[in-house]
Amino acid sequence: MKKIAIQGIQGSNHHIVVKRYYKDDYEIKECLSFDALIDSLLNNESLQGVMAIENTIAGSIIPNYALIDKNNMNIVGEYYLPIHHHLMALPGENLESIKEVSSHPMALLQCKDFFKNHKHIKLVEDVDTAEVAKRIAENKLQNTAAIAPKIAAEIFGLEVIEDEIQTIKNNETRFVIIQNGAQTLATNEINKASLKFELDHKRGSLAAILNVISDCKLNLTKIQSLPKIETPWKYAFFVDVTFDTYEAYAKAKAVIQIMANDFKILGEYKNGRL
């Protein structure tokens, strides 16, 4: 059984990804922060970890890019999960009786339009969606609700008060599968890569890199800049590219490595969209 670290507990979206990605061959390691998830991998307490990296509504989870880079994690896969947020509480509660809703900041952000019509409800940020649901159930917290996946209500015996409260119904989060150390895939199985590099602060430096990506027939699916704290006004760039042939990617990689500074491969893996 593979021990897989997740941010959160059973019943969370990270748990759902593990269930779908690994099927039955896994054991969950619950971590209440992404830092704890990384520590679990560094200390060999877990074989792999599942980490949310971006959402179609809330955008990139920028600190997680830094965590992957700083701790030299290797991205070995990805999974795109449609996100469904449900409001749940103890049996017998309803929207009028609820005074407080706690959940992960991302979940609150993705549901904020729903609560504009329920101004009597106080919104409170918490560490995890399913953890709040578990706390409500264990402590019999009245007048309190959680925003969490429906599986959390099933696990902890709560009632769903409102279904699908996310602002945008076509809401999806991309999760990456990470591990401490490389995973070797055959080149014919690799059609996506995550790269990191830095550039000199001069005109056209980024455009030159993008031209290489285009000329080598790679598709740029993501670009994210991150400031270098120790060097004001200098940035690191994180990019994801997809490609039809590994040879085209290898050519682009070789050229970018010459042109850019601090070039780093964060992972080479299968495109989760295919």
Image (tube, rainbow, N blue to C red):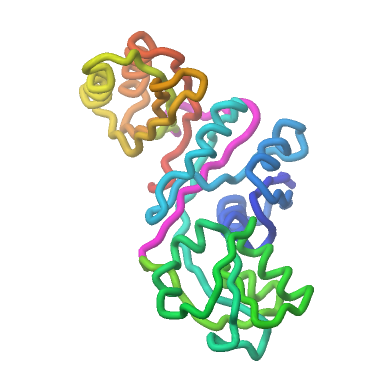
Residue closest to the eye, 74 or 38 = 38
Q: Nearer the viewer, residue 14 or 112?
A: 112
* Residue 113 rendering spot, x and y as whole percentages: 39, 70
Q: At 47% from the left edge and 20% from the top edge, which residue is drawn?
A: 264
95 in relation to 28, above or below: below
Q: Nearer the viewer, residue 29 or 117?
A: 117
Residue 132: x percent and y percent? 67, 66
- Magenta stretch? 170-189
Residue at 41 percent of width and 74 percent of height: 116
**Left or right, residue 96 beside residue 44:** left
Q: Residue at x 24, y 27 (%)?
A: 217
Q: Is residue 113 magenta?
A: no
Give x and y (percent) for residue 169: 37, 68
Residue sticking out furthest to the top: 258
Q: Residue at x 63, y 43 (%)?
A: 34
Quadrant of res 49: top right
Q: Along the horizontal axis of the image, is 187 left or right of 91?
A: left
Image quarter of residue 154 = bottom right
Q: Is 234 rendered above or below residue 73?
A: above
Number of disc labels: 0
175 drawn magenta: yes
Q: Residue furthest bottom?
A: 92
Residue 140 in the image: above or below residue 48: below
Task: Tell me: residue 84, above or below residue 68.
Answer: below
The location of residue 147, given as percent across then percent down, is 56, 69
Answer with the quarter of the image where residue 130 lies. Answer: bottom right
